[in-house]
């Protein structure tokens, strides 16, 4: 399992998004990984989910980060 934030973020993504984000510049990947970590730290719903299934919480946070990014570009 990856230990760096970008690697963990990429691992939390579904395969299609993992490939798309993996093709982006490293700086962009780091920005998204930082947003993902903030999402995990600050969302109380994810805290509850994390107690039940840490991978599910990480996947949900990754999905939210990418959705938020899409909302900003529309």
Image (cartoon, rainbow, N blue to C red):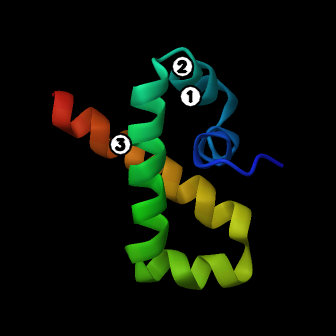
Q: Which mark is residue 17?
A: 1
Q: Residue at x 29, y 45 (%)?
A: 68
- Name the residue tied to disc 2: 20
In the shown orientation, is residue 73 left or right of residue 65?
left
Q: CA distance from mark 1 to mark 3?
A: 11 Å
Q: Total of numbered circles in the picture? A: 3
Q: CA distance from mark 2 to mark 1?
A: 5 Å
Judged from the image, the secondary structure of the residue bearing numbered disc 3 is helix
Q: Residue at x 41, y 63 (%)?
A: 39
Q: Residue at x 58, y 41 (%)?
A: 6
Judged from the image, the secondary structure of the residue bearing numbered disc 1 is helix
Mark 2 and mark 1 in contact? Answer it, CB < 8 Å. Answer: yes
Q: Which mark is residue 65?
A: none
Residue 48 location (% of width, % of height): 57, 85
Residue 41 location (% of width, % of height): 46, 73
Residue 52 location (% of width, % of height): 72, 81
Residue 66 location (% of width, % of height): 40, 40
């Amino acid at each position: 399992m990856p230990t760096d934030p970008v690697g963990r973020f990429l691992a939390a993504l579904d395969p299609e998004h993992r490939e798309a984000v993996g093709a982006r510049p490293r700086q962009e990947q780091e920005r998204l990984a930082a947003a993902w970590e903030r999402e995990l730290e600050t969302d109380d719903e994810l805290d509850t989910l994390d107690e039940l299934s840490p991978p599910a919480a990480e996947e949900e946070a990754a999905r939210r980060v990418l959705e938020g990014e899409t909302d900003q570009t529309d």
